[in-house]
Amino acid sequence: MELRVLEYFLAVAREQNITKAAEQLHLTQPTLSRQLIELEEEFGKKLFIRGKRKVTLTENGLFFRKRAEEIVSLAKMTESEMKNSDSLISGDIYIGTGESIAIRNLISVAHKIQTENPGIHFHITSGDSVDLAERLEKGLFDFCVLFGDIDQSKYEYLRLPYVDRWGVLMRSDSPLASNDVVETKDLWDLPLILSRHSLQSVNFFRWLGKDAAELKIVNTYNLVYNSTFMAEEGMGYVLTLDNLVNTNGTTLSFRPIVPENTVDLYIVWKKYQSQSKAAEKFIEAMENHIENCIISK
């Protein structure tokens, strides 16, 4: 299994058409078709369903596409790091992060680094902690911004000097919207929309005062943007962190929850991981930023 064959496979999966993929790859259609057949024979599994006008992926094909994307991405990252290892500080920095207004500070630091080192490029991917940590483990990210408790045995980390607070997002005509704050007990009998990450936290439900099975959890989300539409439709009450949704001029309201529950933020990277010069520059800049924030307080 060669890297170029993985790129051929991904091109066909993306175009859903062998002819179009062949044109994009500057190959003849018979050549590309033969490569795909040999790939299927190598695994002994069918990866494509070939129709008259398009090809679609089988279940095995869908699984293989995910792995192929990861392998190709990791190969490109490695190539970039090797080419830049002996030159001026340059290269790509891949960061996975959840949603928080504190990310603005990380972006500010990234901008400063890039201004001083134009050869450094940042690639930021949003997601929830489950997906981010998995991609970090596979080497697809250099850093992740994670919320709450972290596994200090696995990661090197910097604790950011910010915290996010839990609250509830709801329609402005909801009875609870007339309150300045919402008590956890007020949520016990209401339809709740929770983040996928919070579902895995024992401490989260201990704070709510009920087990997950005792609550009316009607929907889940991984990024808060789509959950706002659920709230607007009146599907339920979204438990989320503050400052993520601008409710001005909308039909939605956000209220903090008491007792107060805050979440710490960390920038983490794998222990014993060799860092590129660009990544080392980022760590140094973030350390200085955090130190300055602490001093200014």
Image (tube, rainbow, N blue to C red):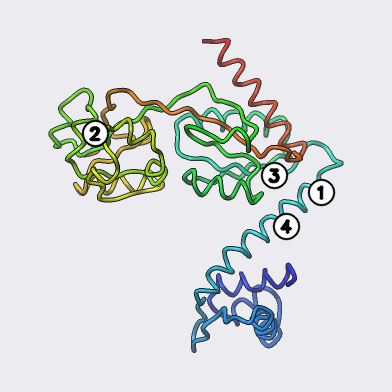
Alpha-carbon span between mark 4 and mark 1: 11 Å
Q: Nearer the viewer, mark 4 or mark 2?
A: 4
Residue drawn 71% across the image and 51% down it:
77
At label 2, which amino acid type do we have?
Ser
Q: Quadrant of the N terminus?
A: bottom right
Q: Secondary structure at mark 2?
A: strand
Residue 18 picture quarter: bottom right
Which dot marks residue 253? 2
Alpha-carbon span between mark 4 and mark 2: 45 Å
In the rendered view, would you say 46 is above or below 238?
below
The residue that mark 4 highlights is: 75
| Sooner in the amino-acid sequence: mark 1 or mark 2 | 1
At label 4, which amino acid type do we have?
Ala
| Sooner in the amino-acid sequence: mark 4 or mark 2 | 4
Q: Are marks 3 and 1 in contact (CB under 8 Å)?
A: no
The residue that mark 3 highlights is: 92
At label 1, which amino acid type do we have?
Met
Q: Position of residue 100 (x, y in %)?
A: 45, 34
Q: Position of residue 65 (x, y in %)?
A: 58, 67
Q: Position of residue 210 (x, y in %)?
A: 26, 36
Q: Secondary structure at mark 3?
A: strand
**In front here: 128 or 118?**
128
The residue that mark 1 highlights is: 82
